[in-house]
Amino acid sequence: MGDVLASLADQVTVVAGVGIVVGVLGTVVPVLPGGLLVALSVALWALVTGGAAWWVLVGVVVLLSAGQVLEYLTAGVSLKRAGVPNRSLVAGGLLGIVGFFVVPVLGLVLGFLLGLYLAELHRQPDAATAWRSTKVGLRAAGVALLIELGAVLLAATLWFAVVLTGTV
């Protein structure tokens, strides 16, 4: 019976590792919710492993949560400073969702940019001013992506370090 449990724990560790790698890739290519997938993979691993593995899950959740807060604050501050209103961001978000289904993977970003540009073109006096606002939105989205990727990579590194060293 002990061999079966050890085998199950090993299998779940492999599944969690694959889930974490897919989560990291999902952060870079916005198809899957990367941070959520990493957290769920570590939670599954902690559930089967037990003991101190729960502290690894706590560390992962803290890292991912801090990344989300930092991402929100950083993007929000730069957009507010540039005077881009929430209405334009909502338009970008809606067209991003449509774009995701029309052109998989790249459609999300392209739709967001098009929606933001069209909303700003409607609000601003000319195309050049609207494009400047769109570039601010693009820069904020890029910084947000880098922050999220950093948090996901730190969480993944924590888990892999614990697993590879056999600490838990």
Image (tube, grey):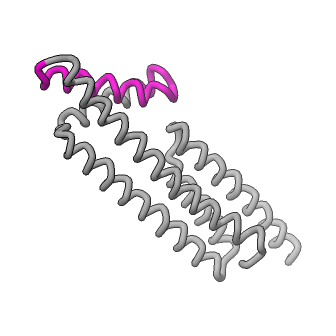
Asked if residue 108 lies in the magenta stretch, the reply is yes
Q: Is residue 8 left or right of residue 88?
A: right
Q: Position of residue 4 (x, y in %)?
A: 85, 70
Which image quarter holds the N terminus? bottom right
Q: Residue placed at 70% from the left, 64% from the top? A: 160
Q: Is residue 43 left or right of residue 33?
A: right
Q: Position of residue 51 (x, y in %)?
A: 65, 82
Using the image, determine if residue 154 lies above or below residue 72.
below
Q: How many marks?
A: 0
Which image quarter holds the C terminus? bottom right
Using the image, determine if residue 167 lies above or below residue 160.
below
Q: Position of residue 32 (x, y in %)?
A: 53, 42
Q: Residue placed at 36% from the left, 29% from the top? A: 96
Q: Is residue 36 left or right of residue 83?
A: right
Q: Nearer the viewer, residue 132 or 34?
A: 132
Q: Position of residue 31 (x, y in %)?
A: 52, 37
Q: Is residue 118 left or right of residue 112?
A: left
Q: Quadrant of residue 102?
A: top left
Q: Residue placed at 15% from the left, 17% from the top? A: 126
Question: Looking at the image, which residue sits at the far bottom?
Answer: 51
* Most frequent secondary structure within the magenta stretch: helix
Q: Residue placed at 51% from the left, 54% from the top? A: 35
Q: Quadrant of residue 13?
A: bottom right
- Magenta-colored span: 99-125
Question: Looking at the image, which residue sits at the far top?
Answer: 127
Asked if residue 32 lies in the magenta stretch, the reply is no
